[in-house]
Image: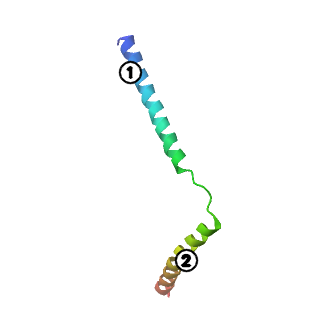
Amino acid sequence: MDKNFFYQKRAQEHQREISQELANRHLLKGLKREPLTMQQAGRLILRIAPVAIVITILLLSLLS
């Protein structure tokens, strides 16, 4: 195998790895979230509470 061909393919592979790593870092950077404020937490609880109550009632009725 020609040395230049090997080095060229290795350089291309290395470039792909770098591009993939940068893409992963970019995605992870976008996932960072700020902590919830008290108002946001209260809204979240008000949204989830009725669903949790209904699921609990259904489970209790099925188990009885």
* Vertical comparison of 7 with 54: above or below: above
Locate residue 44: give its quadrant: bottom right
Relative vertical location of residue 48 with respect to residue 30 in this rendering, above or below: below
If the image is split into quadrants, where does the N terminus sit?
Answer: top left
Q: Which of marks 2 and 1 is nearer the N terminus?
A: 1
Front position in the image: 4 or 19: 19
Would you place residue 41 above or below residue 23 in this image? below
The residue at which mark 1 appears reads as 9
Q: Is mark 2 on a helix, strand or loop?
A: helix
Question: How many residues crowd around disc 2 within 10 Å: few (fewer than 14), some, or many (20 or more)?
Answer: few
Residue density around tag 1, few if under 14, some if 14–19, many if 20 or more, within 10 Å: few
Would you identify the image quadrant in which residue 19 lies? top left
Residue at the far front in the pictured view: 39
* Residue 49: image tag: 2
Determine the residue positioned at 43% across, 21% down: 11
Q: In this view, does 12 lie to the left or right of 52?
A: left
Residue 34: x percent and y percent? Answer: 60, 55
Amino acid type shown at disc 1: Lys
